[in-house]
Amino acid sequence: VGMGYVGIPAACLFADVKGFTVVGIQRKSKRSGWKIDLLNRGKNPIGGDEPGLNKLIEKVVKKNTFHVTDDFNECKNADAILIDVQTPTDEKGIPHYESLKEVSKKIGKTMPNDVLVVIESTVAPGTTEHIVKPILERESRMKAGPDFSLAFSYERVMVGRLLHNITKLPRIVGGIDNKSTERALALYKHIVQAPLYSTDSLTAEVSKVVENTYRDVNIAFAN
């Protein structure tokens, strides 16, 4: 869910795995709805030079293992659902989770029993457990853990190195329970060619914040 810098390459990498079929869900808005038709024609909506991405999109569309829609009813048949929506901050640094809450609500209304939901968007520590989990439980009338799995695992994306960073860099995977963590690890093993580190969802969220902070401090120091 969310066809941007994270969602597109991740979806296409999974769509290239033998036996996998991937559906990308993109809101049909004035700002980004045009991506749906472009991706379904096998074209890359991401500008600039992204090594390997153009050919990968064209390949999985031709194989009929990847297509894009705005219909959340596609979640009804999902084994795993990845959330890759924007979580911007305002001028005061306050995160805005409107998109995350909206898609969580729509996913909760349509997701099947025993599905795995993974949040890949950058979020503040505690978001998986205290924002996304309650929405999914309320809308689905199911319980996280016994009825479905929930995890957080972030991307280290960089423009110009999208496929490389997803496949070649180590990944931290944190679930709300052991089963969720194990299922998410099993999923990412299909596309990540680097070590996978298991933890809980809160620790994974803290790791993302620490990484971003460390990078920002070093950039500020260099400037």
Image: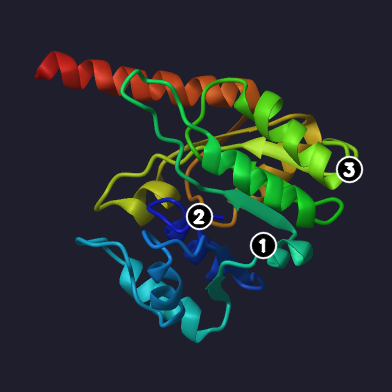
Which kind of residue does numbered mark 1 sit on? Answer: Phe
Compared across the picture, whether 141 is left or right of 181 comes to: right
- x then y, percent, for residue 172: 54, 33
The residue carrying mark 3 is 141
- x then y, percent, for residue 42: 40, 79
Gap in angstroms between the C-alphas marked 1 and 3:
17 Å
For numbered disc 1, what is the local secondary structure? Answer: helix
Residue 25 is tagged as none
For numbered disc 2, what is the local secondary structure? Answer: loop
Residue toward you, 166 or 87: 87
Q: Is residue 176 above or below residue 105?
A: above
* Residue placed furthest toward the bottom: 62
The residue carrying mark 1 is 72
Compared across the picture, whether 138 is left or right of 87 comes to: right
Question: Closer to us: mark 2 or mark 1?
Answer: 1
- x then y, percent, for residue 27: 51, 60
Gap in angstroms between the C-alphas marked 2 and 3:
24 Å
Q: Residue at x 42, y 18 (%)?
A: 210
Circle 3 Cα neighbour tier, 10 Å, few/some/many (<14 / 14–19 / ≥20): few
Among the two numbered marks 2 and 3 on one chain, the one whose residue lies closer to the N terminus: 2
For numbered disc 3, what is the local secondary structure? Answer: loop
Res 200 seen here: no
Which quadrant is home to the N terminus? Answer: bottom right
Gap in angstroms between the C-alphas marked 2 and 1:
11 Å
Quarter of the rendering containing residue 52: bottom left
Residue toward you, 113 or 17: 113
* Residue placed furthest toward the left: 223
Res 84 seen here: yes
The residue carrying mark 2 is 2
Circle 1 Cα neighbour tier, 10 Å, few/some/many (<14 / 14–19 / ≥20): many
Residue toward you, 33 or 142: 33
Which kind of residue does numbered mark 3 sit on? Answer: Arg
